[in-house]
Structure formats: C-alpha cells, structure tokens
C-alpha cells in the first residue's frame, strides 16, 4: 500500500534510529509509518488533476525572464551572504583560528580530530 519512495524513506529513518532506539522512539516511528500510509492513501484516493489548455496570445515562454531574474537574484544573494559572513569572521577573529584557540580542528586526513567515528 505504501509507495516505493515512502517505503524507502520510512525504512531509512528506522535504520538510522536503531543504534539509539528507546521506548519513546516506538511512538515516533509509528507516527512516521502512519504518515507514510496516509500520504499514499491520499495520492491514490484523490482524482488526477486535469489541465485544460487555454488559447491566449501570450508567448509560451513568458516565465523565462522571471526565472532568469530570480536565478540572478539568488546568485547575488548567495554571494553577498558568503562575503558578509567571511568579512564578519575575519573582523572578529582575524586570520587565526576561530573559537577555541587551544585546539586545532582538522576534519580530514590522517591527523583529523573528529569525535565522530
């Protein structure tokens, strides 16, 4: 009854939780599974949407300029946020390490200091 996508998401969630499984997680996992079943029932119970084409004089690609402006605005916003964040970091900490100055954190390589194994 559950669609393949919902089944895989529910299964992946359950596998992710197994190492720290507690009695409270039973309720959570039950709610997630019930949600997947209800979503699948809604997908199959609702009638399919029918789209009737309208004949208008508007060109078919009227959204292209809007999409281009949106993409450019998003790119400009991401670049601005990155530069602003970097400048705040340099302004607060300089070019040295941030936060705890006694520990150097190395994420990758043979000398990594990750706590997650």
Image (spheres, rainbow, N blue to C red):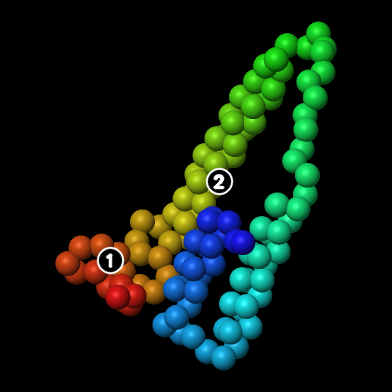
| Residue that appears at 58% across and 56% down | 3
| Residue that appears at 28% across and 66% down | 106
Relative to 83, say whether 30 is above or below.
Answer: below
The x, y position of residue 115, in whole percent, is 33, 77
Q: Residues within 10 Å of mark 1 (few under 14, many from 20)?
A: few
Q: Which residue position is annotated with label 2?
A: 81
Q: Which mark is residue 65?
A: none
The x, y position of residue 60, in whole percent, is 70, 15
Q: Secondary structure at mark 2?
A: helix
The x, y position of residue 52, in whole percent, is 80, 24
Separation of residues labelled 1 and 2 (CA atoms) = 25 Å
| Residue that appears at 75% across and 53% down | 45
- Which of 107/61 is in front? 61
19 sits left or right of 79 in the view = left
- Which of 105/32 is in front? 32
Q: Residue furthest bottom?
A: 23
Q: Quadrant of the C terminus?
A: bottom left
Q: Secondary structure at mark 1?
A: loop
Q: Which residue position is annotated with label 1?
A: 106
First reached walking from the N terminus: tag 1 or tag 2? 2
The number of numbered badges drawn on the structure is: 2
The x, y position of residue 102, in whole percent, is 32, 76
Q: Residues within 10 Å of mark 2 (few under 14, many from 20)?
A: few
| Residue that appears at 46% across and 84% down | 20
Relative to 63, say whether 73 is above or below.
Answer: below
Residue 34: quarter of image? bottom right
- Which of 81/90 is in front? 81
Q: Quadrant of the N terminus?
A: bottom right
């Amino acid at each position: 009854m559950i669609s393949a996508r919902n089944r895989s998401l529910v299964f992946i969630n359950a596998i992710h939780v197994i190492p720290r499984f507690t009695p409270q997680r039973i309720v959570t996992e039950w709610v997630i599974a019930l949600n997947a079943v209800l979503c699948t029932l809604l997908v199959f119970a609702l009638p399919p949407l029918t789209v009737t084409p309208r004949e208008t004089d508007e060109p078919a690609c009227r959204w292209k300029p809007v999409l281009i402006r949106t993409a450019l605005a998003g790119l400009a916003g991401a670049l601005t946020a990155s530069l602003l964040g970097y400048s705040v970091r340099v302004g607060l900490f300089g070019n040295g390490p941030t936060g705890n100055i006694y520990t150097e954190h190395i994420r990758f390589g043979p000398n990594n200091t990750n706590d997650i194994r």
